[in-house]
Amino acid sequence: MSGNEVLASIDAEIAALQQARALLIGSDTAAVKKKTSTKKSLKKKRTLSPEGRARIAEGQRKRWAAEKKKKKSRK
């Protein structure tokens, strides 16, 4: 056997051992992969513009006023 053949044989053996190791650890690596993939899929925090916030606040004030008006008319 030449040096290249020996190295190729060693590389093949290493690959087979790594594959066997991956099969034995299997479930642990799957859990690690799931954890890392969820971090990547997290969405950015969304923020409102001041105008949007003002529109929401005004709408809520109108709803509160309508509820207050209903309660007064019931009495």
Image (spheres, rainbow, N blue to C red):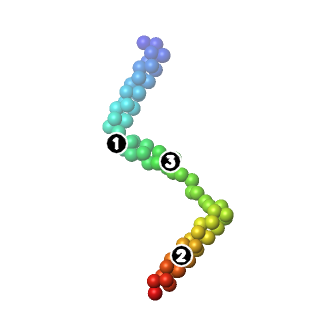
Q: Which residue is mark 3?
A: 41
C-alpha separation, residue under disc 3 versus residue under disc 2: 41 Å
Q: Mark 1 or mark 3: which comes first in sequence?
A: 1
Asked where in the image residue 48 lies, by quadrant, the reply is bottom right
Question: Horizontally, is 24 left or right of 5 in the view?
Answer: left
Query: Disc 1 to disc 3, how far (Cα)?
Result: 21 Å
- Residue closest to the eye, 5 or 68: 68
- What is the number of the mark on residue 66? 2
Q: Are marks 1 and 3 in contact (CB under 8 Å)?
A: no
**Can you identify the residue that label 1 sits on?**
27
Residue 39 horizontal side relative to residue 46, left or right: left
User: Is disc 3 placed on a helix, strand or loop?
Assistant: loop
The answer to whether 3 is drawn above or below residue 21 in the figure is above
Whichever of labels 3 and 2 marks the residue nearer the N terminus, that label is 3
Amino acid type at circle 3 is Ser
Q: Note whether 15 is above or below 61 in the view shown.
A: above
Element under label 1? helix
Residue type, label 1:
Ser
Instruction: Tell me the residue at 64%/67% (across/down).
Output: 54
In the drawing, does residue 55 fall left or right of residue 13?
right
Q: Nearer the viewer, residue 70 or 3?
A: 70
- Residue 19, located in which quarter of the rendered image? top left
